[in-house]
Image (cartoon, rainbow, N blue to C red):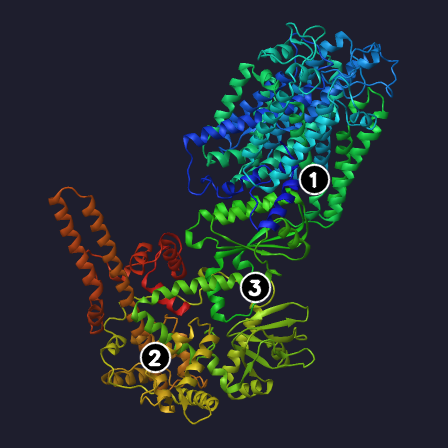
Amino acid sequence: MGDNSESCGGGGDVENQKELRERNEDDSSENTISTSSKDPVSKAKDGHHAHGDEGPTTTSLVASAVVCFVIYFVFCIVFSSVVWDPLAFASSSDPTFGVPQGVGINLLGIAIGCVAFAANSGSKAVMAGPDLIPVVFFAQAGASVVAYLSSISSDPYSGCNDETTHHRILGGGGYGDSPDPCVHRRLADDEVYLDDDAKMQVVPTTLAAMMIGNAVTGLLFYGLGKMKNTAAVIGFIPAAVVAGFLTCIGYKVIKLAVLITTGYNFKLKYVKYIGEDLPHANDPWVPLTIALVYGITLYALKRKHIIAAEKLILGFITVPLIMFFVITAAMGVPMEQLRQEGWFLTQQGDGIECTTGCPFTVTQFWQGWGIAYSGGRGNGVAWAALPRAIPIFIMGSVMTTLDNMLKLTSSEKALGVDLDYNHEMKLGGKATMFSSLIVGSPAYGQTKFNVMNLSIARTSTSEVPSMLLGTISVLFFFSGLAGPVINIMPRFLLGGLCVFAGVGFLYENLWEARLVMNKFSFGIVWTIFLVNFIYEFFILQLLPLGVQPMLPGLLVVFCLGLILATFEFMFAFMHAAKPPIILKGAECCSSTVRSEKHEKQLAIVARWYQVLKVDNFVFFGTANAIYQLLKSNVEHQATLPRPTRMKYFILDLHGVTGIDLTAKDVFVKVKRLLNDHGITLIWTVGGKIMRKLRRWGILKEEPFDSIDLALRYVEDGCLSRAHKLCEKWLVNNTVRSIFEQQTMATIFSLSVRSDDKSLASTRLRPWGERLNLKEDQMIFTESSQDDNLYMLYDGEVEVQSSDGSCRAVFNGSFFNLDALLISVGSLPGPPTTVCATAKKDTMVLKITKQKFRQCMREDGALAQKLLLTLIVQNENSRPGKKRALWKTDRETSMIKLDTVPFVGSIASRLLLGDDYIIDLTPSQIENFSTIYDIIAADGGGEEIPMTSFADHVKQEARAQGSTLDPEQFNLLIEKSGIDEDGDGSLSKDEFLNFLRGLIIAAIPAKEVDTLKIAYDNALAEHPEGPMDEVRIKALFNNLGFDVKHPGIHAVLGSVDADGDGEVDFDEFMAGVGMMKKLLAQSHDLDNAFLEYKGRATILRRSLVITESASRGTNKGRRRATLTKRLSSLFTAKATAVSHQEESDEVGRGNTQQDISDNDGNDVRKLELEVPDLVAFLKITPEEAEEMIFLADEDDGDDAGTIDRAEFQQLLKTWA
């Protein structure tokens, strides 16, 4: 009934918060009626059905319309009583115009609203029509008209003493047939008298005022929607001010309930008469008590959500009626006596034979149109009275518009849909303006009936219930049967429904609002209410009668509310707000210290998350701007390829100084929008804002204390998601074997080239000391002035900076590096790291400044590489850093597997044999031996126990960012065959042999002389110059090796591990063996790639065959199709299986440059597509798309597939 919970976030919010605390469930709507239909609503999203999986039926659609009509019709009687019953004594028309005709006005509004919204609204479940808030202002306008007409009438009762004589405005008597004319005085809003001419003008003038007010309201609706300013206007008035307005509406509704049930205005001068004992009428306190018990009980039961709202309200309409008539029948009291005693609404005359206290008759539907457009009879419309109602028009239009806009937000939430506010406002404006032309009431969406419709009809996509409700309403309007129905509706029932509505306004905003508002806002609510109460109850009656209707309490508090709103916003916006901007993942990185490999991986998946930082005070307007920005961004995301779309969205509210209650529904929409698109919402908020969001039921998950922690969580999630996807490639044994070899090779890499971004922690072991730390153990403090360098092997460390901020350090990363860099003169200023703590059991490598200086003297290349790594990491971990997207920042060119220069080359002939073992270089042996001695020393013996070696591999791999679990490491060590004699320990010879086989491949013995000649010839070209890496790289190119292979950096860095800048023949041969290793792995990956493609082709074609066989009806045609398909199938299989033979042919010198399958396709140009991965990996299309995205380096038309080069790069990036 237009309760506060619909009109503002206040009441419904409080009620739902209480339910959340008690039941820990989601609230379903912003109004108290709809929450009783909670379960159906909560299951209805985006037009899906409520009540589980049950769909709508014809019966449910019709039942929804009928039930909603019955309830709405009773409310229409209440609405009409509020306006027309107080005017009955003052009006005169033939036939009488009163409550039944007012019901017809409301029925027209329902009919127009339901049809218009069913046809054009964003949700077909919307049911539109009038509500109590505009009705209150219509009643105020009617009182203003009566006051004006009284001022121009001569009052024969001017000598009556109002303090001692009074009479209720009920249609029944109260004092019998007393000769005192003052006793028969009738009271309207105050003591007024109208002569016969003035009485003839009451109805036409009131109808004219109503039509003008409706037109103004409709124009305001339409104008805001047309100018797209709905959110801006609704956001201008704070929730506290809106809640204060609604308490005044609630007080006004309670006053009307008192007036309907007792006949007295609720003012100080009449309170004493409510409890009097009248001899010829019902005592005023009796129906009022019944109404209070009725309304409060209904409200309390509805809040408990015991049964659905529509069932509860129907029951509370029918059961009291039955009980009343049963009791009166048992007492033998006839209906005529009940009317004379004032138990029912009556009219002054029926135009037939009854002249007072008469029952209503069937009305003429055209009566309102005739009076409105003919000016009535007698003197017609009193145009001079209308300017006095201008403040009421303005105030009523603004409040009704605000009610409409806030109902939009609650309907959105209740129905689980996104509505275009501006479109809905324009639609309501058109419907209301048309309704005003035919003397109807305002028409806009009503949340309570929307939810009832969804609950009963079990769908939000059918317009049938709304259309049917509109049709029933217009048919009932034409029938004129409202009068006979009103004759059986006791005043206490109508007053009780007013109490039901008014209690919700008062209780939820004056009491429970304390739970969702701060003290200042809650104080504003009470200030507005108390000012209105004191003014209307004590002060208004002291003003001249002609002035009272022009200065109602609602107008006073409306002006007061605008002033308070201005002050509240001035207080809230003391600081300039920054416009909300959505930052891409690459533009917003955590300060977490990660390995270079993980940084590179995060550059690839940076598209998967975005950040929105919100500052200053948030109210509906700013919250809606945030929503529109996010909605536009999400809609743009939907146009992107699926694997590149956002997976996480971080909403950072740490800069927010306050949130107004009107913003609550917008945050609910934000959550629903992201959830509907499969995007995980991450909150960063704390303090009072977090507590407020929790009280509102919006924030249920645990938020992060800072944006940095949220970014860390999201980055971890993206990496974990990507790693799990990449592991799916390991179904191929060759790929798994190469993956394991690359993992081991990375661990024991000796390369220290500046252009090779990786730095194996193993190379640093001789210069540091490993420390095992317990959880929460301090590593160093500010007072210790520690200038050592630390690298995290495994675990987690938190470092604190001098500004008080903390950041996490992950495996393979260095910390306290600024202190070391400053101590050696590589960075200026004091160090920013003040302390470090192990957050769980942790292992670190500690490199002292003395050891670092020794490294600079004895291994300059390593020290230089370490310094470069530290500087890069220091830059990457600075606050506000940006991460370049991978596709725009490639470190090297991709592998070009062009066989033209390779065919017939020396490099190709190296694949034909492996009878010549190439030894490690002296420098490699020295470095590896040092590592062996350190590992052996850790084990406490001359040889390394295999368990100790396995532990070492795990730790080093963790430092390199490996995600393999311990069992996978154990299996990897076991499969390596490193323990040649099987004695459970590792000798130095076994260790060196293992590493040699891991990084250097054997070659044909007959090619050694050829390689010697090639080396000597290259040396002879510039005998005076050193045989440096530039010349070696050129020599590799002349031999037929692919020098653009990313692995060339590690090869060149390893062959010159002593850093003297001169590559002798032994080092050159080691480089040849390493290049062959890369070449062999590349060919193996080619074979695996083609095996994937071949298997996928077989599976996909098998599916086509099955589908073709199931659809075919012509056996001959089907047989021919099967023959053709099978032929292609075996051709594809032969292509995949025989590729190794083709590679061998290339190696033997085959000069064929175009290797094609039977369909004429160049196998080197084959690419893996999404259906291929779905077919042979048995994964979902979404997973396949993301796997391709992680490997795909192309843009434009070639994007969305993986070629052979991208497949090989994938293994290097994600191994």
Q: Is residue 412 above or below residue 885?
A: above
Residue 36 position in % (x across, y down):
56, 40
Q: Is residue 415 visible?
A: yes
Query: Quarter of the image containing the C terminus?
Result: bottom left
Query: Quarter of the image containing the N terminus?
Result: top right
Which element type, helix, strand or loop, lies under badge 2?
Answer: helix
Q: Is residue 31 visible?
A: no
Q: Is residue 832 above or below residue 526?
A: below
- Three-letter code, disc 3: Ser
Mark 3 burial class by Cα count in 10 Å: few <14, some 14-19, many 20+: many
Q: Is residue 1059 above or below residue 51?
A: below
Q: CA distance from mark 3 to mark 1?
A: 47 Å
Mark 3 lies on residue: 590
Q: Is residue 1072 above or below residue 221?
A: below
Tell me which label, 1 or 2, sits earlier in the chain: 1
Mark 2 lies on residue: 1074
Mark 1 burial class by Cα count in 10 Å: few <14, some 14-19, many 20+: some
